[in-house]
Amino acid sequence: AGLLSLAATARGGTVVVLPKANPAAVLDAIETYAVTDLFLPPTVIYRLLEVLQETPRNLSSLRYLIYGAAPMSVEKLRQALTAIGPVMMELYGQMEAPASVTFLRPDEHFADGAIAPDSRLSSCGRPYPLVEVEVRDDDGLALPPGTPGEICVRGDLVMKGYYKNPEQTRAAIRDGWLHTGDIGLFDDEGYLHLTDRRRDLIISGGFNVYPSEVEQVIWGHPAVRDCAVIGSPHPDWGEAVTAVVELNENCSVTEQEIIALCKQELGSIRAPKAVHLVPALPRSVNGKVLKKTIRESFWREQKTKI
């Protein structure tokens, strides 16, 4: 978001800065200043949709509503395309490769005159023209489409290294390629699908469970506003799949209903073993869910943290 603001300033544009990610204030700013380009994390977009359901707004000035920084619910992305319009654009990148590694253009959210299928919307787009992107195995070999591995990036946008930290630089950049630590795969059309952060992978009883695929199922429940899936300590399995869920106002659902939904869609292994309903998930000042904080609350008393 900061880079986008600098680009707008360099071209003589106006940058509207809000003190916090308040959805009503964001909508007010769009109408008041005729905002054309906007970056928001998914959790803030979810709250915008709730406000728009109650009070429609004039968002006709928007050309791009860029989203990123965390996976987005496909169900809520469909709602956004209907409520806000054909202006959604996803960016995938990280501090080590700023601006963009891949992007999903607004028009790519549609296919054959309708909203694109979930297989397209769940992707984070195709590689940016100025970078090369490969999915590699643990031996550094490029993998074919459909096979998950670590996302590696090369190009002029990639950092030279970590400041005064040559050891960490050598670990991250090998043979000119940045190893992002993110797990993903390419589909047959060249779209990159971010499976999960390597550090967020849950290993439960020897099985790999990617939190994002469980979160996608839970996000699809109409009573759910947002959720985070983490691995909590388990004496036998090492980690147990655990969901922390925030509900929409005046909505209710039981823990067992969410578990049953996940079992139906994903099977018993990947379904949560526990669900915790909370009034609100912890978030950063820009609205991003603090999954690290949630995980630490479960592991605080443990001697090991996997």
Image: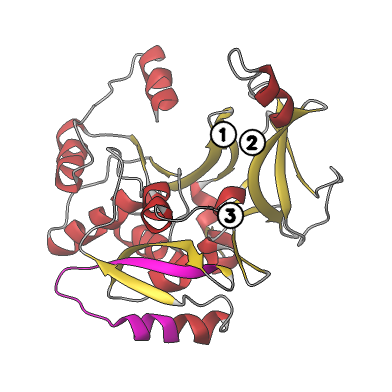
x, y percentage for residue 204? 60, 69
User: Was residue 244 drawn as part of the magenta stretch in this picture?
Assistant: yes
**Mark 3 is on which residue type?**
Ile
Answer with left or right where residue 111 lies relative to residue 67. Answer: right
**Up-down: is 271 above or below 90?**
below
User: In what quadrant of the picture does the C terminus appear?
Assistant: bottom right
User: Was residue 243 drawn as part of the magenta stretch in this picture?
Assistant: yes
Q: Quadrant of residue 54?
A: bottom left
Query: How many numbered discs?
Result: 3
User: In what quadrant of the picture does the N terminus appear?
Assistant: top left
Q: In this orientation, which residue lies closer to the viewer: 103 or 274?
A: 274
* Between marks 1 and 2 in the image, the one whose residue lies nearer the viewer: 1
- Residue under the image location 39 percent in, 52 percent down: 300
Crowd around label 2: few <14 · some 14–19 · many ≥20 (10 Å): some
Q: In this figure, which residue is indicated by the disc labeled 2?
A: 128
Disc sitting over residue 100 in the figure: 1
